[in-house]
Amino acid sequence: MTTSHKWPELYDPEWMHEHYTERKMTMYDIADLLGCSDGTVYYAMRKIGLQARPNTTRLARFKRKPCRTCGTVFQPEATAHLYCSDRCQPKAARQRHTCAFCGTEFEAKKPHWHHYSKKFCSAEHKRVFLADDPSRPRRTVNSDGYVCIRVGAGYPGAYATGYIREHRWVMEQRLGRGLFPLEEVHHRNGHRDDNDRCPVCPFSVAPPEVRDGRLHCTACDWESVSQPNLELWTISQPRGQRVDDKMEWVVGFVAQYGAQYGYALTRI
């Protein structure tokens, strides 16, 4: 018997075989007997190679039926199970598909294992295909109401599919740099699809510039009437309430944004 574990009985094959197999005790009964959790019992059973009994309550919903290949009566785990094992399942019954990215044939995986098992042979090929597919829309709206534009895979701050939220991309073009982790872009009027774009030029054109508090498009000389809708926010805040902590935060904050807004640190 192994004594390095807190419950050595769980790792004793003879003790577990007697209580679980012969006495027909459940994992919950053994856990209550030893004072541990049922997950600990299940982990120990996997370690010693003891096969867990099937969930008879769930399997009782499916009637036992003969295998279509060998005729052996078996307990199906779902209504669509027609064969007792993969060996009895004919090769023709295993659906084969062609990967949309590499063109190789592969056997379809179970739907609850992989959501794109019928179109791509791997998750990597699916991500690359979706990121570089030219037929996908240049501009789309996600479920949250934000406009997303396709900038391609590998773009800083973009999703794995090659899309980035348009309001963040517009602010990056305006600042000439990428956004910091603690920076956010806020819509003043609350409309998530109003991202300071020129209503005349296509979306492939660079966003308008900000001149004297107005938007000015360099491609068509369009100028907005109102102020820009997007404004840069930051969620950084000073740590603690001591004066030393706040002064240290102020120095770092001005050093980060001072040159952009015309502020500089001076000695008093």
Image: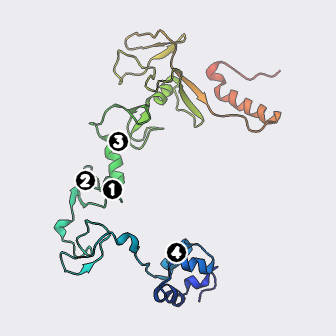
Q: Are marks 2 and 1 in contact (CB under 8 Å)?
A: yes
- Judged left or right of residue 157, residue 129 is left
Residue under numbered circle 1: 122
Residue 248 % position (x, y): 76, 34
Q: Quadrant of residue 186?
A: top right
Mark 3 is surrounded, within 10 Å at the Cα level, by few (under 14), some (14 to 19) or many (20 or more) other residues, namely many
Find the distance from the CA under tag 3 to the CA under tag 4: 40 Å
Q: Are marks 1 and 4 in contact (CB under 8 Å)?
A: no
Find the distance from the CA under tag 2 to the CA under tag 3: 16 Å
Image vertical order of residue 242 relative to residue 47, above or below: above
Q: Quadrant of residue 253?
A: top right
Residue under numbered circle 3: 131
Quadrant (top left, top right, bottom left, bottom right) of the C terminus: top right
Mark 1 is surrounded, within 10 Å at the Cα level, by few (under 14), some (14 to 19) or many (20 or more) other residues, namely some
Tell which circle, 2 or 4, labels the residue nearer the N-terminal end. 4
Residue 153 % position (x, y): 39, 41
Find the distance from the CA under tag 2 to the CA under tag 4: 37 Å
- Judged left or right of residue 159, residue 39 is right
Residue under numbered circle 4: 43
Tell which circle, 3 or 1, labels the residue nearer the N-terminal end. 1
Amino acid type assigned to the residue bearing label 3 in the image: Ala
Residue 156 % position (x, y): 47, 38
Q: Secondary structure at mark 3?
A: helix
Residue 159 % position (x, y): 43, 41
Quadrant (top left, top right, bottom left, bottom right) of the N terminus: bottom right
**Residue at image x 38%, y 14%?**
219
Residue under numbered circle 2: 99
Amino acid type assigned to the residue bearing label 1 in the image: Ser
